[in-house]
Amino acid sequence: MKDPVTRRQPEHLLLIGGGHAHVAVLADWIRNGLPCDRATILTPSSHLRYSGTVPGWISGHYARDEGLVDVAGLARRAGATFHEGRCSRIEPDARMVETDTGERIEFDIASLDTGGVGQARDVLGEDPRLVDVRPIQNFVERIDTLGPSRRIAVIGGGAGGVELAFALRNRSADERGPDVILVSGEAGLLPDFSKSVRKAVEKQLSKQLISLMKQDAHITAGGLYAGRTSLEPVDTIIAALGSGAPDWVKESGLATDEAGFAAVDRHQRSTSHAHIFAVGDVASRQDRNVPHSGVHAVFAGPVLAANLRAVMAGQEPRDTYRPRWSNLYLMSTGDGRAIASYGPLCAKGRWVSRLKHFIDMRWLRKYAVLAGGSG
């Protein structure tokens, strides 16, 4: 591993990206003080959009900006410098980051939580109707300006694709709503969930007249296909295909996995550069499988905060995020109900939707209080 942290006492800590884990780091700094004299967060937007409320906004249960976290406000309360910009290049050996506007920022210790990038066009092909879920802010802006769609195809059979299919089916004030096709791919619907959850989701899809296709989608000669079946005519194609790795990670010289995500150890530290940490969708744990999911990024945040505090004090990181045997997932069905998944257990109904609302709003209020100065 290059350039050990112990070469000298680090002075400047740079957070690159304003994702869920870095929001937790800022919260730690507000509660416990900065771990160093100088700290900066570089992120493209002053606010983090919480993806958990986006389906509820589409289906009319939330206002568009009800799910925002004030990252700039958190940085200000923590005593860190907020720098608006996007990382376009990192030179880990030179300890320098270049932004999309050509600015250069030096650091001693850096942490990456930028999220991944959309890969819809790489997977499906080019089409002007294609709307990628990532980055989430761009997705919201596209949906906000989306005109009436009589027929929508959602590509991706994970929890995100399922929630968006339900949300888009219920987007219109018209009782009929648009026709929605969910294309799960050959991996099938919710492959990482229990049989009882898949059965409940399939039943609800059928009830809401959402077609389910279990073939891989592709765009050929301007047409959308599932396997050999044409899905045309389609007005809008929503891609919920998971994250791809940003090119600048692959080009940086940092160790990566085969897909190009930053390779990190159990402390979220780069396996090649001890002064670089990474977490969330931009990172890939090498000691165990941790799926790219907002749930894991949220829980890894406090662990990252403790490890960054340790290295800024000239110590080795000690804390490790260990995923639970199962996590609670709450999937909105767009009609005021939701489906809960916890291991093999499944529940559904309006009370599950109320529980989801309570958990989401509690998480958002926590950061609103901290950013507002009353925490």
Image (spheres, rainbow, N blue to C red):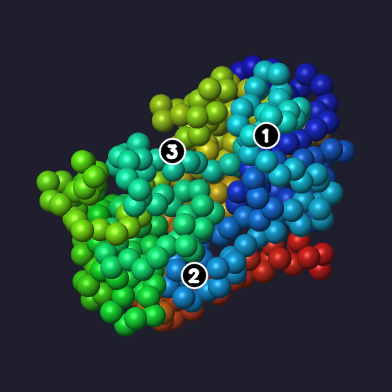
Q: Residue at x 63, y 66 (%)?
A: 364
Label 2 secondary element: helix
Inter-mark Cα distance, 1 to 2: 32 Å
N-terminal of the pair, mark 1 or mark 2, is 2
Inter-mark Cα distance, 3 to 2: 25 Å
Inter-mark Cα distance, 1 to 3: 23 Å
N-terminal of the pair, mark 3 or mark 2, is 2
Camera-nearest residue between 165 and 368: 165
Label 1 secondary element: loop
Whether pointer 1 and pointer 2 mark residues with C-beta atoms closer than 8 Å, the reply is no
Quadrant where the N terminus sits is: top right
Name the residue that disc number 3 marks.
244
Q: Quadrant of residue 310?
A: top right
Q: Residue at x 21, y 47 (%)?
A: 223
- How packed mark 2 is, by other alpha carbons closer than 10 Å (few <14, some 14-19, many 20 or more), is many
Q: Residue at x 63, y 26 (%)?
A: 90
Q: Is residue 281 left or right of residue 23?
A: left
Mark 3 vs mark 2, foreground winner is 2
Name the residue that disc number 2 marks.
57
- How packed mark 3 is, by other alpha carbons closer than 10 Å (few <14, some 14-19, many 20 or more), is some
Report x, y in % for residue 181.
25, 61
Name the residue that disc number 1 marks.
101
N-terminal of the pair, mark 1 or mark 3, is 1
Q: Residue at x 47, y 57 (%)?
A: 142
Whether pointer 1 and pointer 3 mark residues with C-beta atoms closer than 8 Å, the reply is no
**Amino acid at pointer 1:** Thr
- On the question of residue 32 being in view, the answer is no
Label 3 secondary element: loop
Report x, y in % for residue 305.
70, 45
